[in-house]
Image (cartoon, rainbow, N blue to C red):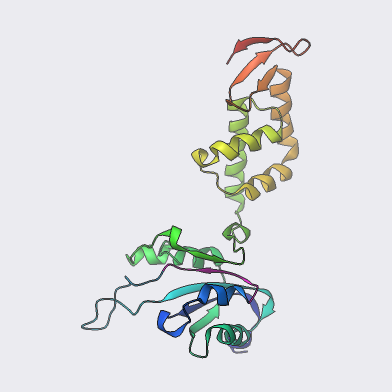
Amino acid sequence: MARKYIKSRNFSCILYPESIPKNWEECLSKLGVSMAVSPLHDKDKSAVKGQTYKKGHYHVIYVAKNPVTTESVRNKLKRVLGDKAVAHIEIVDNIEHMFKYLTHESKDAIAKNKHKYNKKDITYINGFDIDRYVTLDESQKRGLKNLLLNIIRKEHLVNVIHLLDVLEVHGTEYGIHNMSDVNDVVTANAGGFRLYFDANYQMGYRYTVTTTATKKFDKETGEILADK
């Protein structure tokens, strides 16, 4: 079966500024599907003699609500952007890789020394969230679990809400950006995390949300005994 007749939910396409309306963002939003649009790629080096850069273009990630064909996606895009809008469209097997390619931060783009674009210039349509499509492998899950347990031990946390409070403020300092991954790892290893929380509680530690400081206290009177 030809690939263009294979159904998928994840696609990418290329759009050229001169072939789409000025209000292209509004037009795309009318389709009601999640999309991410790259910064304008106007610094891509050209292999054509006498041409420094390729013609400026946008890369688009298109996530359909149900499995559809490339032709179906092409027709929907043409309907809102015009008949000449879509230059190229294909199925995406790895959204994380394609998302990184939007700014040339994918491994292949880096290897080819392609110009890196600013991630802040990515346009998100209809609530596109890359975290929904990035999954951790078993090694990464194990690493995240060990990191979270170390945070619990270091900060003397006694329950999962305190852990989430710390990560909300300091998560990026630990290299944690996706709270969905945190929730998945904690729930999948609830018994192990409970051991750490219970141990801190039994040692008489109380977590202070405003300062993330921990103090040892008398569990019967609540009196603070010593700073930690």
Q: Is residue 11 visible?
A: no
Q: Quadrant of residue 124?
A: bottom right
Q: Is residue 63 visible?
A: yes
At a point 29% along the width and 73% down the height, the residue shown is 45
The C terminus, quarter of image: top right
The N terminus, quarter of image: bottom right
Quick one: 106 or 140, which is closer to the camera?
Answer: 106
| Residue 44: image location, x then y, percent | 33, 72
Q: Residue lying at the far front in this picture: please name it.
A: 23
Magenta residue span: 31-39
Q: How many marks?
A: 0
The reply, left or right, for residue 201 in relation to residue 211 is right
Quick one: 137 or 83, which is closer to the camera?
Answer: 83
At a point 57% along the width and 25% down the height, the residue shown is 211
| Residue 77: image location, x then y, percent | 57, 83
Q: Quadrant of residue 103?
A: bottom left
Quick one: 113 or 215, which is closer to the camera?
Answer: 215
Queried whether the magenta region covers residue 185, the answer comes back as: no
Residue 96 in the image: above or below residue 81: above
| Residue 107: image location, x then y, percent | 42, 62
Residue 7 in the image: above or below residue 174: below
| Residue 172: image location, x then y, percent | 51, 42
The reply, left or right, for residue 124 in relation to residue 186 is left
Q: Quadrant of residue 50?
A: bottom left
Q: Residue lying at the far right in this picture: please name it.
A: 220
